[in-house]
Image (cartoon, rainbow, N blue to C red):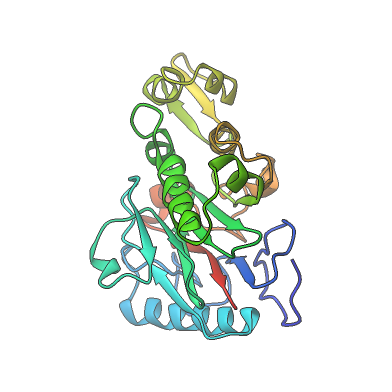
Amino acid sequence: MKNANPLPPDWLLPDWPAIPGVFAVFTSRNGGVSQAPWDSLNLGDHVGDAPQAVMSNRQLFAAQLEQLAACPVTPHFLQQVHGVQVCQLPLAAAAARAFDACVSNAIGQACTIMVADCLPILIAHRELKIIGAAHAGWRGLAGQQSVGVVEQLWQAYCRLVEQQQATPHAAIAAATQVWLGPCIGPQAFEVGEEVVRAFTQAKAQAEACFLPGAAPGKWQADLAALARQRWQALGIDAIYGNDSSTGWCTVANPSRFFSHRRDSGIFGSTGRMAAAIVRTV
């Protein structure tokens, strides 16, 4: 994905095939006005940062997004609660309700997800320009009885596709691509037996995404691999981005990424980055 406008330092463009009329980006922690420990482009309004600083950062983000996408853009920041609820944008009073994923087919309405260790997921239809995004921590990803935020996002996305084109889910999957953004990596994500059970009780293949930790009863969880398995089970083959290597790990890259697990115990808080996807035409 390329754009004539310069990308801010450390921001990422998804490494997936470009879709004309769709633009996506992931911010870094740099380029804003917040003071430590939220320095500097903190986009979260719930982490103790000065409200005016967050407002300024969101304005900077929106302006930069408009410049990069080359169209008027409205980013929608959701009230994320590690759940599985999905909304369609634009939605009146979305900020007052709890959603961890969103979909849209409207021009200029940016599906925006904030993260600081959880996994950001972007999804797009190559032909219909239908887009979506999800915030996936382990709870939202596991869900209940194998239905988590990935499956709920997929169902909402398919309903939106079907409104425009009567298409079986297999055909929708063939025309869909997914990007997995930076998150806490397996080398830094130690979890207990309850997390392993949440995934493996319903999907035995998830066991491959956990390696024994340093202490008994502890495991190193690969969040990106768990999400990749979920998308593959839905028939999605075009999955890009996070391959679980160190470069994608929010904990291991403090100069580029915020990390709740790394920073909160030391500083008491940390900022939030954003993944955003928008239909431009």
Q: Position of residue 215 (x, y in %)?
A: 48, 18
Q: Nearer the viewer, residue 164 or 11?
A: 164
Q: Nearer the viewer, residue 85 or 245?
A: 85
* Residue 244 falls in image quadrant: top right
Q: Position of residue 191 (x, y in %)?
A: 44, 28
Identify which residue is drawn at 39% across, 47% down.
265
Is there any visible trace of residue 99 in the rendered image?
yes
Q: Nearer the viewer, residue 142 or 27?
A: 142
Identify which residue is drawn at 32% across, 50% down.
85
Q: Nearer the viewer, residue 136 or 263?
A: 136
Which residue is situated farthest in the top direction here?
216
Rendered view: 258 above or below 219: below
Please indicate whether residue 226 sits to the left or right of residue 84 in the image.
right
Q: Position of residue 127 (x, y in %)?
A: 65, 61
Is there any visible trace of residue 115 in the rendered image?
no
Rendered view: 182 above or below 24: above
* Residue 14 falls in image quadrant: bottom right
Q: How many marks?
A: 0
Rendered view: 17 above or below 172: below
> Which quadrant is home to the C terminus?
bottom right
Which residue is situated farthest in the front direction here?
166
> Which quadrant is home to the N terminus?
bottom right
